[in-house]
Amino acid sequence: MEGTREDRASAGRALRKEVPRTGHAAWDPASATRDPINVLEDQGASRIAELVPVRHGRMASSPFAFFRGAAAVMALDLASTPATGLRVQACGDAHVSNFGEFATPERNMMFDINDFDETLPGPWEWDVKRLCASLQVAALQNGFSPEECERIVLGAARSYRERLAGYTSMRTLELFYDRISIKDVIAHFPPEYRPLVKRDVKKAHRKNHLRAVAKLTRNLDGRVRFVEDPPLIVRLENTEFAMAEVMSMIDNYRLTLADDRRSVFDRFDLVDVARKVVGVGSVGTHCWIALLEGPNHPAGDPLVLQVKEAQASVLEPYVGESPLEHHGLRVVSGQRLTQASSDMFLGWSEGPRTGRQYYVRQLWDTKGQGDPMAMDVNNLAHYGSLCAWALARAHARTGDAVEIAGYLGTSDTFERAIAVFSARYAITNERDYRSLLAAIKSGRVEARMDA
């Protein structure tokens, strides 16, 4: 970063002339003439055909579910909105359900962004707008009034601005050591909501590899194997792939681990593999779960890995290709840059026959999150500002926080513009959601509604 601290802050303030902060309100629902179904169909062309209807069905369940799956649609829209030109390692899909609690390798619980499929260097504004628009959509679906929706979005945007400003006072190493601990999370909420936070943390503690094994496997003839639930879970032998290909992928993956992690990984043997549908937006990509067994416990010593296909980021058409030639590496690198601490088995690999690129992590490693659809107004307002805190921290680590903070200033001008944008974009999202329902009804797209 060139220039003194004051030079960078001054440069940020100067950007207001080129890109007024009030300009971030700009979005006209009537101008969104693109066909969202075309975007979904284009994505579906590279996915497993029998699973595309599952994706459509999940997105059709609600406006918020549609929003979750429509990152590519919103990326297209965001490309036409004002931006300062300041870049960070963008999440690319920073909606409210892509944040949560998880355990570090040291077994400390923390709160952070937890999805990086779309990560790429890009405009910081796009992450803020996707987060705040997701809060607006969730709040509307919860039946909150326009005034309540605005309060939730304003609180998140304000939290982003104020937390980012706070990070400008940190030394570089302090910033990279900083993390949002569970104690911080509990203290962030008013006393009446702290029992709910503690409940979510307890649920996260229970969502670990042992529970994954208990839920997803059965003992068949003395051997632990994944239980099929087609098309959501399909054993390897019932797909087009062979175990030899999986072993080749595993060998490539282990080389991406640090020496100490590789030594731990080498204690495990591969037991079983299955294809597993996950999420909403990711449905239809190639995603696998692998059961491995270690030597050290008479009742089982399991490790469950998720091997998830990494395609090009939805941001790529608008910000340029990733400087990294492997999309699995793109995801891993973006996650490590952004998160305070990442999964100890995070790595990447490539399919030997198909050339598909993957990243690898533990399936469940003490992970949890709040459910925005089950929150009242005040709870969602505090949760939204918590997510914005994590986003500000990620952007401060990977961009010039001083310059961005200089641009944002100390007034509420930016957050009020974001509140207007979010209200307007929620109208577009509702219209796009209705377009999907109409496409399903007309037979243009197929949807499996029960998956």
Image: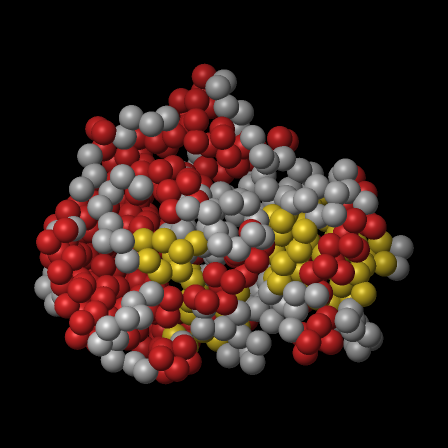
Residue farthest right in this picture: 221
Residue 442, how many percent across, how many down? Answer: 45, 17
Q: Is residue 235 above or below residue 17?
A: above
User: In the picture provided, is 23 more to the left or to the right than 178?
Assistant: left
- Foreground of the two, 365 or 142: 365
Which residue is at 28% across, 34% downward? 428
- Is residue 131 visible in the rendered image? The answer is no
Q: Where is residue 223, by image quadrant?
A: bottom right
User: In the picture provided, is 182 more to the left or to the right than 134?
Assistant: right
Q: Quadrant of the N terminus?
A: bottom left
- Is residue 138 visible in the rendered image? The answer is yes
Residue 307, how many percent across, how many down? Answer: 65, 54
Q: Is residue 449 above or below residue 194?
A: above
- Foreground of the two, 430 or 388: 388
Residue 151, how many percent across, how many down? Answer: 18, 56
User: In the picture provided, is 317 more to the left or to the right than 255?
Assistant: left
Which residue is at 53% across, 69% downward? 342
User: In the picture provided, is 219 more to the left or to the right than 443?
Assistant: right
Residue 281, how many percent across, how many down? Answer: 49, 43
Which residue is at 24% across, 43% downward? 81
Which residue is at 79% across, 55% downward? 247
